[in-house]
Image (cartoon, rainbow, N blue to C red):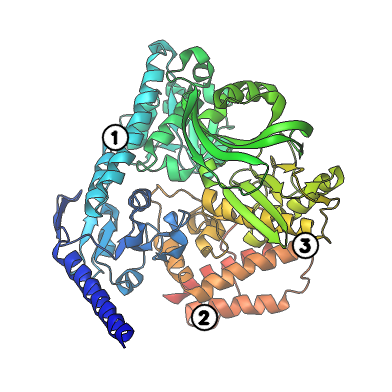
Amino acid sequence: MNFEINNKRWWVLILVLVFWSGWWSIVWASPVDITDDAGQAIHFEQAPKRVVSLVPSATEIIFAIGAEDALRGITYHSASLRGAGEKILVGGFFSPAADRITALRPDLVIVSSLHSALVKKLDAGVPLMVMQTRHMDDAFRHIKLLGTLFDRPVAADHLITKNRQMLDLIAQKVAAIPQPQRKRVMRLMGSGRIMTPGNDSFQNEMIKAAGGIPPDLGKSGAVVPVTPMEWAAFNPQVVYGCGTDGKAAKALLQRDGWNGVDAVKNHKIYTLPCDLTCRAGAHLGDFVAWLASLIYTENFSDPGCEVLPRKVVHTRPISIDLPYVKKACVATSTIQDFTNKSLIVDFKIPLSAVSTLEGEREGLLTIGNHYSSPPCWPLMPMGGLEPLHQMVYPVIDRQASTSSFLFTGADMDKLAVKKETFKAMTVYALVTAGVRGNAVRMGTDTGNYYEPGTINMIFLTNMRLSKRAMTRAIISATEGKSAALQDLDIRSSFNPLTAAATGTGTDNIIVVDGQGPFVDNAGGHCKMGELIARAAYAGVREAIAKQNGIIGKRDVFQRLRDRQLSVSRLAHGIDCNCRDEDSTLAGRVEQVLLDPTYAGFLEAAMAISDGADRQTINNFEWYGKWCLAIAGDIAGQKVERLKTQVDIKDLPTPLAMAIDAVFTGVLLRER
């Protein structure tokens, strides 16, 4: 009886505490007052909790300061951010869907000055915050503003400090370069003609921050045309673009009148990620550093020009529960003035391993995986592994004779640690993976070069593996990796329209022999092979999600992007998020593809295209009828035939038919 009474008292106390905590949070919620870029004063009684962000740089900052739980809707330009897969897509930047925004019942919509038409369609009572990036300093102001709005001031200040420190570092390094040696740099935009940001663009400010000399064409605006005379007079020494801009530029610049400048003659044409190139936001400092290292590779490669000492600045432990593992950690270091991160696994006793990078190794006390950040990539020493060892091992205090490392451009903070067990058998897989820009389909793509690995896997087990088992484990791991890429529909970087990737061109594996009961086989019919393949499969999927934001259930716009397509490119031949090249057609197609029925149709077309290429689907009569039915459903009327709407080289016939169906339906819908 006393127990029941005490139980009731406890429940009453719990309910009182729950009620009190809820009431307390309401009473003490801090009011927020901000002023947006339109000069509009906005008051909130508390931080907004149902936000729709139409501005990619704002969305990126919100994720970077840890306030992403407040986001309900985003554009597809931000869908690859880690964790963004849980958010609702409201369309693209230029043509978001007002009805989808309204359906989310937002307490704040973040817009730009380009969204004036959309604003008229939204409920008058929904607070709107205008964010517009015109200068680099706007990035810091936006970070500060969003930190205040979402009650993340410490995280915002940390992000600002990190970016300013990187900009200060680049300023110091560039200051050592004499003014006559400074290089002329132009950012290229567009695919049909040469265009560039205007004088007042933040993109030219980024070139200046990187130590370059941007063009002064006397023109203002986000994008301005460049004449052949202006091009020749400026004579750029370095040019860069993003997305398909860079590829288009290489073709355009082979034409007479354009191919005589230093950048073309010296092959200084670079393609960089649009997410960095077109935004002044959370990663401003990182982009400027990367650009500076491309502009001044020779200067930055000189150890005598380094500003910061080479040393480990931070370590964090990694848990690996195996009896022979002494310790494991990720060590963050400064090398060549930029961030490097090393996965380090130390053993209690010397062990053997098989490495696809180094071959068979004996007497190892350490194995690992080393990451160099993008500004380091142009600076990497040539001449094989020995220069890399000489650069890295002294900094992390390890010896080449007792160490075996892999090397990668995938961030070690995105490391996947997967553990698989069966009875007394345990396998660990330590995986990093990046698949943008280097994915290949073996047997189809051409091999032209060598770099340190991009999908790197290290396997440790509590069993003693024979040499036969270690080498066989490489096959099991590779098959698990390829299965993961197949299931994620990772595309070849060289033939994305027609080829699914089986790996990247620079993958590597280490298998350690381990300690414990003896195992002589790691093939597909035995448990050791199964566990290794399972760990590889799970590790690759998780590492790709962390590094590239690619998950299985990604939206159709990302699936198009994986094939180097976009609605904008299909409509106009243009594929750059930072250009105001939208039209009614592209916007209407985006709206249609927000419907799961039509998005699913296009996704099915992608799978059917792969089947056609592999000759597993041979009859397409039924498919043609489906395409006509979809076009008619979109148009709201019967469609007798499809008209070719896009002309893209190597576009598979089934996918081309599906795109024609969607565009035909949209074009007929409002006639």
Could you tell me the amino acid type at mark 2? Asp
Q: Earlier in the sequence, mark 1 or mark 2?
A: 1
Residue contact between numbered discs 3 and 2, judged by CB atoms under 8 Å? no
Task: Say which mark, if any, is on residue 156.
Answer: none
Residue designated by label 1:
200
Q: Nearer the viewer, residue 353 or 70?
A: 353
The N terminus lies in quadrant: bottom left
- Which residue occupies 69% across, 42% down? 507
Please tell me whether mark 2 sits on a helix, a strand or a loop: helix
Percent x, y of residue 140 = 27, 40
Q: Earlier in the sequence, mark 3 or mark 2?
A: 3
Residue contact between numbered discs 3 and 1, judged by CB atoms under 8 Å? no
Could you tell me the amino acid type at mark 3? Arg
Q: Nearer the viewer, residue 632 or 503?
A: 503
Residue designated by label 2:
633
Please tell me whether mark 1 sits on a helix, a strand or a loop: loop
Q: Is residue 258 visible?
A: no
Q: Is residue 390 left or right of residue 520?
A: left
- Which residue occupies 58% across, 50% down? 416
Q: Residues within 10 Å of mark 2 (few under 14, many from 20)?
A: some
Q: Earlier in the sequence, mark 3 or mark 1?
A: 1
Task: Say which mark, if any, is on residue 614.
Answer: 3
Q: CA distance from mark 3 to mark 2?
A: 30 Å
44 is higher (above) or lower (below) than 265: below
State which mark lies toward you, 3 or 2: 3
Q: CA distance from mark 3 to mark 1?
A: 50 Å
Please tell me whether mark 3 sits on a helix, a strand or a loop: loop
Q: Is residue 660 left or right of residue 448?
A: left
Could you tell me the amino acid type at mark 1? Asp
574 is higher (above) or lower (below) than 557: above
